[in-house]
Every structure is written in C-alpha cells, then in structure tokens.
Amino acid sequence: MGLGDVVIPGVAVAFLRRFGEAVQGPYFRNALAAYALGLLAALAANTYLQNGQPALLYVVPSILLSAWFTAASDGEVPRLLSYREDREAAEDVPGLEAGRLLVAGSVEDDGMFGASVVLLLRHDHAAGSLGVVLNRRLSEADRALLVDRVRGLDERWLTAGQVQAVRSARELLRGDVRLGGPVGIRDFPFQTCVVVHGRRSLRRARMALRAPTEDGDLWWSYLSEWDPSFDSKDAVLFLGLSGWQGGQLAGEVSQAMWGLAAASPSAVGQPERLLERLKGSGAVRYFRAQAV
C-alpha cells in the first residue's frame, strides 16, 4: 500500500466531511465506511489474483459511489457537484432575512431543491440559516408508512421529550404534511422537524412571517415543542429541514441559485403551483455576483 493509496482517498474523505457539515448529511460517515470496504476489496483481490494491484483502484471508486448514492438519496446531487468552499468570502445579501421566501433559480425538479420554494425561518450570515420547503407535499403512501412507524413505537422505552414528539407526530400526521428538506429526514420523529402554525400562545413559538393583520401571523416550533392536545387542523408539519452553514446561503443567492420574494400566509397555505405563481408575478428578485 503506497502513499498515494492514503493521500488521494484522504483528500476525498476530507472534502466529503466538509460538505457533510455544510449540508448536515452523513457523507463523512459513509465515506469512511466506503474507504474500509475499498481496502477489504483490494485485499481480497490481491490475495485472489496474487499480484500487487494498488488499493487506489478500489478505494477511490468506493468513496465516489458512496458520495453519489448519499447525494442521490437526499436529492443533493446538484449541490454536491456545485459545492465550493469559498462561501465565507461571500458578503451577506440585502433582504436575505428570516420570513422571506427563497425561490429556486432552476425550474427543473432535479432533487430536493429543484423547482422548490423555501420559507426562511432563521438567517444569520455567520452562524447559518434554516428553512423549510413549502411546495413538496408528502405522498399518501409515505404518510401511511410514517403513521405505521409512530404507531409501533413503545412509549415505555422513550424519554419524556421523545414521548411528546411521538404523540405530536401522531396528531399532525392526520393533517398537512410536507417534505421540508433533507436534514433529519431519515429518523422521524426523533430528528428535528418543524411545525408552522398560527398559535402565538404556544410556548417557545418563533415568528415565521408577519402578515398584514396580526391574526394572520404565522409561527414555527420544533416538533418536540408542539402540544399534542392542540387542534392541528391549521398546522403544517415539515418532515426534514433545509440548512446552510454560515455564509453558504449568501453565496448561493449571489450566484442566482435562489431568488428572494416576500412571504405571505397564502404561500404557506396554498403550495400548489407556488413556484409558477411567484415567477409569474414578477415579485422574485435574483442576484448575480459581479466578476472581480
């Protein structure tokens, strides 16, 4: 095993670790597993063929395949291919703030973020951003699978916080459920999920968007903070979140990967053809960084 068998895969694993941290995905863990499998495959091949083939021939394809399949399963292939690590150099974008809509620059439904509209719940240029995709309703087949999953959980083995999350999930799954993003989507209901609602009185409720009248204001809470005794008729459960590291979202907006638009309760409550409605209204503003 030569130096190149360690250095080149190490560079790939390090890149996937940084990308995984940026999108909060399991890329680093999967890359390490793929690296180990590649080494085992190289050892088996060299033992069987009785010649000294470089481990690089097995390790690198294994790591690349793990990255590709991880990205494909989360709809993040475009982000993986376009990822750059100079995002900290990007300045914040005027108007990029919580309560705004991110409107995808691409109209092609090529993954989780293709043709999507995101409600930005939190934005801090240095610390990072958090939002939920509005226009991806959960299919009835997937809803049935989730209902079966939470129904089969034995509350005796759960913490108090987990019990509340499970009970809230059981109630909210009866109503409006959407795919909010790739972060935490695998381990529902124990990973972070968000509920957008109109209950200002709910403890720890955070402002999602301010409407022209106070009665129309929308708030958001984590699933573990929702009260399962509340009427969930007007609440929207978002399975998974959309997250960006510090400076990353500003970089994507400045490259016109996202446009900005004002949010409204109707955008949250009526997600059908939302992208077309926003682009047709001319209310979306796209930015393009100036070449230096």
Image (cartoon, rainbow, N blue to C red):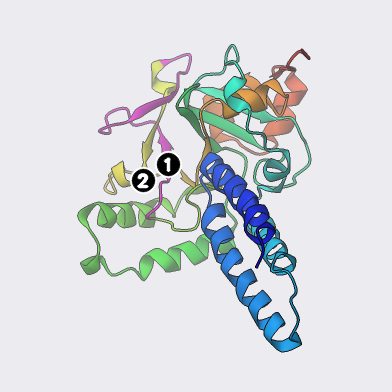
Question: Which quadrant is the N terminus positioned in?
Answer: bottom right
User: In the image, residue 87 lies at what x, y percent?
Assistant: 61, 27
Q: Residue at x 78, y 36 (%)?
A: 107
The residue singled out by tag 2 in the image is: 223
Q: Main secondary structure of the magenta part?
A: loop
Residue toward you, 25 or 15: 15
User: In the image, residue 201 lies at what x, y percent?
Assistant: 27, 29
Location of residue 189 with respect to 121 vertically, above or below: below
Question: Which quadrant is the C terminus positioned in?
Answer: top right
- Position of 139 with respect to 212 (left or right) is right
User: In the image, residue 211 lies at what x, y percent?
Assistant: 47, 18
Q: Give yes or no for contact between labels 1 and 2 (Cβ–Cβ under 8 Å).
A: yes
Q: Amino acid at mark 1?
A: Val
User: In the image, residue 179 lies at what x, y percent?
Assistant: 55, 47
Q: Residue at x 71, y 41 (%)?
A: 114
Location of residue 62 with respect to 287 vertically, above or below: below
Q: Secondary structure at mark 2?
A: helix
Please indicate, yes or no, whether residue 71 appears anywhere in the rendered image: no
As for residue 193 lying within the magenta part, the answer is yes
Q: Which mark is residue 194?
A: 1
- Position of 64 with respect to 138 (left or right) is right
- Position of 37 with respect to 56 (left or right) is left
Please indicate, yes or no, whether residue 20 appears anywhere in the rendered image: yes
Boundaries of the magenta span? 190-213
